[in-house]
Amino acid sequence: MLKALFADSSPDRAHHGWPRVAVDADSWRAIGEALREGKLDLLGLWGDVGAVQCALYEPATRQIMSASLDARAGRVPSLALFHAPASRLERAAGDLFGIEFTGLPDPRPWLDHGRWPLHHPLAEAPRPGVALPPYPFLGADGPSLHQIPVGPVHAGIIEPGHFRFTASGETVVRLEERLGYTHKGIEKLLCGKSFDAAARLAARVSGDSTVAYSWVFARAVEAALEFQPPPRALWLRAVMAELERIANHLGDLGAICNDAAFSMMHAECGILREQTLRACATAFGHRLMMDCVVPGGVAADLEPRGVEAILALTSGLRRQFPELIELYENTASLQDRTVGTGVVSSALAAEFAAPGYVGRASGRAFDARVCVPYPPYDAMPVEIAVRSEGDVDARVWVRIREIQHSIGWLERSLAALPRGPVHSGVRAVPTTSVEGAALVEGFRGDVLAYVRLGAGRRIERCHLRDPSWLLWPLLEAAIEGNIVADFPLCNKSFNCSYSGHDL
Amino acid sequence: MRRRLFKNLITAPCTEPVAEPTDQFEAAGEALRGAIARRLGRSLAIREVDAGSCNGCELEIHALGNAFYDVERFGIRFVASPRHADVLLVTGPVTRNMREALERTWAATPAPKWVVAAGDCAAGCGVFADSYACVGAVSKVIPVDLVIRGCPPTPTDLLQGLLWLLGGVGTAAISRPAGS
C-alpha cells in the first residue's frame, strides 16, 4: 500500500530514519482513503512552517513512511475528514501554525485556550494573542441527563485536565475531554536550540517517560546526522528503558487496585516501585534517570555496583511479584471491578493505532521493539503480551506480563552487555538542513520524534508525539456506558500523559 | 490474601529505621510532627496543584506516601479539596492555561495557608522558563512561602522542605523565595 501510494515520488534524501516523500493534495487525500480503509496506521501528524507532515505505518509490511504536503497557501485537505484519529492532531497543528485543514469536522481550537500572548505561536510571523469565546462542549440532550464537570484541578496528585461527564443516573452517556492546560510551548522552545540543550527539554516532555523521550530524541538526531552511538550505549539505553517500564507499570498496577479501594495492593506495589527507583538511582545516578540518555550515547557508564543493584532488584521482584499476581487473581472483589470494565473494542484500537498496553489489551499486536526493531532489541528480542478482551483487567494483565518480560530481558542483557565506550562526540556538521525520525517504545506506547537540524546543528523543527494523543480519545469511548465510579479505574488503566499530550 | 496479611503482620515494616541512610529524613519527620502540633494541632493537610509540570514532580510527591516514607505517620496527608488544605504544594512552570485555575485554587484555600513551590519549574529556573505559554515561577502568581528545588526534588527533599516551613532545620536544597 505504501509503495503503491508513493510509487511516483522519490524520498527526500535529507530525511533519515525512514523515508519521507513530498506529496500533492491528491496524494494526501489518497492517504486519507487508505487510512479510512484501515490499510495504514496514522502514527502522527504535525505542522511546520508552510508544510504539514504525517507518519504512516503499514502493518502488513511493517514499514514506516512520512509524507509531507506544502501548506504555504495556508490550507490543506483534512485527513480527519477520512480518519477520526487525525482530528485532535490537526486541531493542534491549526492552533500552533495557523494552518487551515479544509473539511476538518471539528474546527474548535484545542491547545489554544485564548490565554497566550501569541496567536499561532509557531507560525512564521505570529500575531498577538486573541481571546477566545468559551469552549463549546459537545451536546448530549435528553430527559434526566446531568453534567459533572471535573478539573482542571483534580482530587488526587495528578496532572490537570478537564473532563465533562454527561450521565444518566450513574451511567456515563458521554465523556468529553478538554486538554491543553499543561501546554508549555515546548516545540517553540526547541527551535534554535543546540541538540544538547534540546535534549534536556525532550527529557521533560513527560517525566514518567523521560528515558523513552531522551532515547527517541537522541535516535532522531543521530539518524539525521547519520551517526551510530557505541554499542554499549545502546544496550544501556534499553536497560534504562526497561527499568522505566517496570517502575511505571508497578506504580499503575497499585494505583488501579487502589481506585477499586484495594489499598493493600497499592502499598505492596509501592514498595516494589520504590525499590526500582532506588536501583535506578544507584545504577544511573537519578531516580527517574533524567538526562541519562543523550545524543551520542549515555551520560555515564554503568558501574559493577549498578549491575549488582539491578540484579538484586530483579531477583527481589522474581520473589515478590508472583505473590502479588496471585493476590490480584484471587481477590474476587477486585476482579469484580476490573473484569468487563472500560472496554475498548478491537476495531477502535485498530483504527486509532492504539499504542502500548491499551492497543495490546485490545488485540493490536504492535510493539515498536518488535515490529520496527531498533538496537539492541534486534539482537535480543522481547516478547509481546497481547489480550483481546480490551477491558481494565486485560490492560492489567498486559502490564503484568510486560513486567515479567522486562525482568527477564534485563537479566539476560546485563549478562550480554558489550564492553567499550558509552559516548562518542557527534562531530558531523551539516551544511544544509538534515532530518531524522525515530520511534521508541516507552512504557505507555510508542513515542515518535521528528527532528530537522539546520546549519550549526541547531534545531529548526522538532516534533515529539506522545502515545497519549491516540489514547485519550479511546478513554472517552471506554467509559461510555460504565458507571461514573469506574472512571478512575479506566483512567488509571490508561494512564495517559497530560504533559506529553499538551507539549 | 489472608496469608499475605498474616505475613505482613509478623514481618518488620518497610518503613526505614532511623539508623538507615535515610535517618536524616526520619529525624525530619519526627521534628515536623512537633512543629505541626504547635501550629495546627498535629496535622498538616496538603492540596497538590500541578500547574503544568512534566509529571516528574508528581511521581516523587506520590512516593511520599509509600511504605518507605509513609508521611501519614507524621500527620501529613494529601487532601482532595483546597477547602480542606493548610498547604498548597504547587509544581510546574505555571502555564498560561493553568494560571486562572491556580489563582482560584489559592482563593478557595482558607487561611492560615502556606504555599510551597516544589521543583525547579515552580521555582522559576526550570527548562520552560522562557516560553510564551508559561508565566514562570509560582511566586509570580500567588505568594510563595517556600521553594524546594530539584528536577524533580526527591521525597527526602520534599519532606525536609515541609519541615523547614514549619520552623524546622533548613537544608542546602531549599531556599527562601527572592524578596522574602
Image: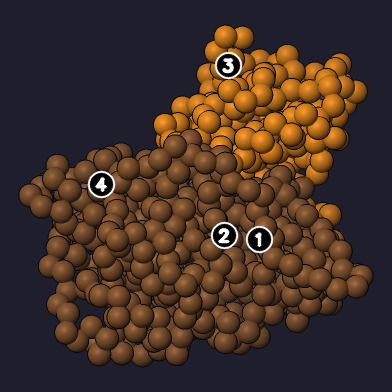
Local packing at callout 2 (Cα closer than 10 Å; few below 14, some 14-19, many 20+) is some
Q: Residue at x 69, y 65 (%)?
A: A138
Where is residue A392 shown, x and y percent of the image? 69, 74
| Mark 1, residue position | A177
Disc 3 residue crowd, few under 14, some 14–19, many 20+, Cα 10 Å: some
Residue A23 screen position, x and y as percent: 24, 74
Q: CA distance from mark 2 to mark 1?
A: 13 Å
Q: Nearer the viewer, mark 4 or mark 1?
A: 1
- Residue A113: mark in rendering: none
Please give the letter of the chain rendered in brown: A
Foreground mark, 2 or 4, reads 2
In the rendered structure, which disc, 4 or 1, sits on the residue that comes first in sequence?
A: 1
* Quarter-of-image position of residue A68: bottom left
A30 to the left or right of B144: left
Chain B: give its colour: orange
Q: Report the amino acid beneath label 2.
A: Arg
Which residue carries the number 3 mark? B177
Q: Which mark is in front, 1 or 3?
A: 1
Q: Nearer the viewer, residue B154 or B98?
A: B98
The residue beneath circle 4 is A459
